[in-house]
Image: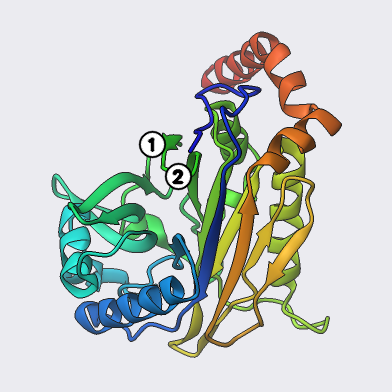
Amino acid sequence: MGVMGSHPGTNYTMAVTFRAAAVQIAPSKARYAENLDRVAEAALKAQQAGADLVVFPEACTTGYFLEGGVGDVAVPADRLAADLAARLGRIEIDLVVGFYEIDDGNIYNAAAHIEFSGAGAKVLNVHRKFFLPTYGVFDEERFVSRGREVTAYDTRFGRFSMLICEDVWHSVTPMIAALKGATVIIAIAASPARGFSASVPTNVDTYHRLLRATAEEHGVFVINSMLVGFEGGKGFIGGSVVVNPLGEVIEEGPVGEEFMMIADIDMDLIDIARKKSPLLADLVSALEDVTREIDDVNEALCD
């Protein structure tokens, strides 16, 4: 099985195809063990459907709106992996799980990519939410620390990056992921419904536009999993999507209900898309100038 190199434009040694599941789940607020039971149950069902990778939403192990109670349910990534391994047994599958992480006394809104095999559970990467919303119903900066980097990491399927909710709304974060060699971007979210003038909440439409644009601009697959359910009278939207590198939605979940969707990911399509629209290569060629411009902006802001 070939793996994408660490730099944009690197070719595969051979074709990679895998099956991904994106699960819309409505967690029980602050009930970590109960929610892990449901995550494990869904993962086993996804594996029975042939899934190699299962993606769960932001904060799916506890619910999102915990505010000052977040410290009571935050766990280290290794603890999350061990707790899931105890429920899954010795199966071969990868999970991406949104959770509240505690590390060195700090609490983060995080996502862990965990690889399960006969040898046990291995945490491949943890992404800590880079952009924390502080508007409307959101006040994350009061309760969690902000992540400081966007990473790309190797998996048995290719090179991945993870983003959480508002990270997707800022074009710079998926750009960094792509520049670091990501060919698949996992985008998880817990987004309360906003705007009801159309047939679906406005933020469902916005997410779909942003994710399609991300996939098409950078020539990457985007696998998106959205929280559902109600917390404190706020309803989470669902409407998860899988988008191919041409910017086409290949699978879409319903709005407002629990659901599992399955998508076959053909990594050969990345090379085809990047040859058709070499925007990422153009960015790489201009990166020195882009970086200089950003440095100039940063210097002006600091004056």
Please name the residue shown 45% across and 60% down the image.
52
What x and y, as percent, mark residue 144?
31, 56
Please name the residue shown 29% across and 80% down the image.
35
What x and y, as percent, mark residue 282?
77, 20
Badge 1 crowding class, 10 Å Cα cut-off, few under 14, some 14 to 19, many 20 or more, is few
Compared to residue 155, the image places residue 264 above or below, namely below
Q: Is residue 253 visible?
A: yes
Give the residue type at disc 1.
Answer: Arg
What x and y, as percent, mark residue 107?
24, 54
The secondary structure type at the circle numbered 1 is loop
In the rendered structure, are the residues bearing label 1 and label 2 in contact, judged by CB atoms less than 8 Å apart? yes
Compared to residue 195, the image places residue 130 above or below, namely above
Q: Earlier in the sequence, mark 1 or mark 2?
A: 2
Give the residue type at disc 2.
Answer: Phe
What x and y, as percent, mark residue 53?
45, 59
> For residue 270, which quarter of the picture?
top right
Label annotation for residue 148? 1
Please name the residue shown 36% across and 76% down the image.
44
Residue receiving disc 2? 130
